[in-house]
Structures are given as structure tokens and as C-alpha cells.
Image (cartoon, rainbow, N blue to C red):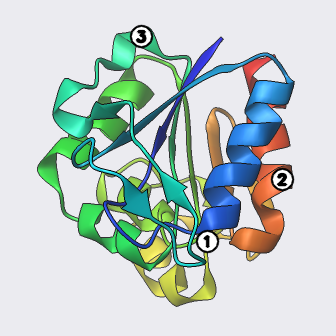
Amino acid sequence: MKALLIIAPQNFRDEEYFYTKEELEKAGVDVTTASRSTETTTGMMGGTAKPDISLSEVNVDEYDAVLFIGGSGSAVYFNNATALDIARKADAAGKVVGAICIAPSILANAGLLRGKRATAYPSEEANLRAKGAEYTGEGVTVDGRIITGDGPTSAREFGRAVVRVLG
């Protein structure tokens, strides 16, 4: 199993990236990290990550799951054509698609949450509802192959939910 974690070029949320990655790797999932570039990026809490590939290099067919990590920096992807296209292609190909914190707005903006149950950081509730999602306010919500999380305190459960859905 292979998963793609997409992080912001700056200010990703450390726990959401590191804990999700840890849960996936613990379950034997091969994790690739992507961002706008392959420059080292710094999280909101000071952790650093060096993306393996840039968004422009992503081939959705190579992954079983595509996950958008939150943090204030992830807002750069809300209307980013490449990020929205990756989300849509992953969904169309039947992949597990997930997002945590404010990043579920990427999925909402890509049109993937219409008619789906989803959660996010409370600041994104209005956007998710406006795009047709049934906002749950839960820590982690799974609706079919779509997995959403509300923030850093749910990062490990988000990772475990992805592992369960990947089966």
C-alpha cells in the first residue's frame, strides 16, 4: 500500500503530518510526501519535512491514498488548480482521499464532499456546508473512501482510519 501526504510549503501542522505518517508506516504503508516544491518546509510547531516530490510530479495512479495535511499553510491549496485536480483524480480513480484540520476545504472546493458526511476544523464548517457536505463536527469522519479529521488532537485516529479503509 502506498499513500501520498500533501503538506503546505510552510506552516503545515506538525502533529497532523508526523502522527498520520507514523500510523501509516506502523501499518506497513509506504509514504511519499509532496508539497509545492521539494524545498524543506517548516511546520507551525517548528518541525521540518523535506518533500519527496513536488505537486507537479504527482501521479495519482501510484498511490492507494491521497491525504491533505492541515495547518494554516494548507490554505494555499484551497483554490490551487493542481491540488484540486489531484483530489479529483484520486477520487475518480477510487482511491482513499483524506484531509485534516482546515484541509477538508480543499476536498470541498474540489467538489468531493457534496452529499458526504465530513468534519474539519470549526473555521471550515461554513465552507463545507456551502459545498454540500453534511458537517459532523466529529474528530474523524469516514464516509466511504473519504476520510476527514478536525485537527491535531485527532491526527493519530485519522491515520488509523486511513489504515482501516485501505484494509
Mark 2, other Cα within 10 Å: few <14 / some 14–19 / many ≥20: many
Q: Residue at x 45, y 55 (%)?
A: 114
Mark 3, other Cα within 10 Å: few <14 / some 14–19 / many ≥20: few
Q: Return the residue at label 3.
A: 62
Circle 2: residue type: Arg
The quadrant holding residue 42 is: bottom left
Q: Secondary structure at mark 3?
A: helix
Image coords of residue 99 (percent x, y): 55, 53
Q: Return the residue at label 1.
A: 120
Circle 1: residue type: Ala
Q: Residue at x 72, y 71 (%)?
A: 152
**On residue 156, which mark appears?**
2
Circle 3: residue type: Glu
Q: Secondary structure at mark 2?
A: helix
Q: Is residue 132 left or right of residue 15?
A: left
Image coords of residue 155 (percent x, y): 76, 59
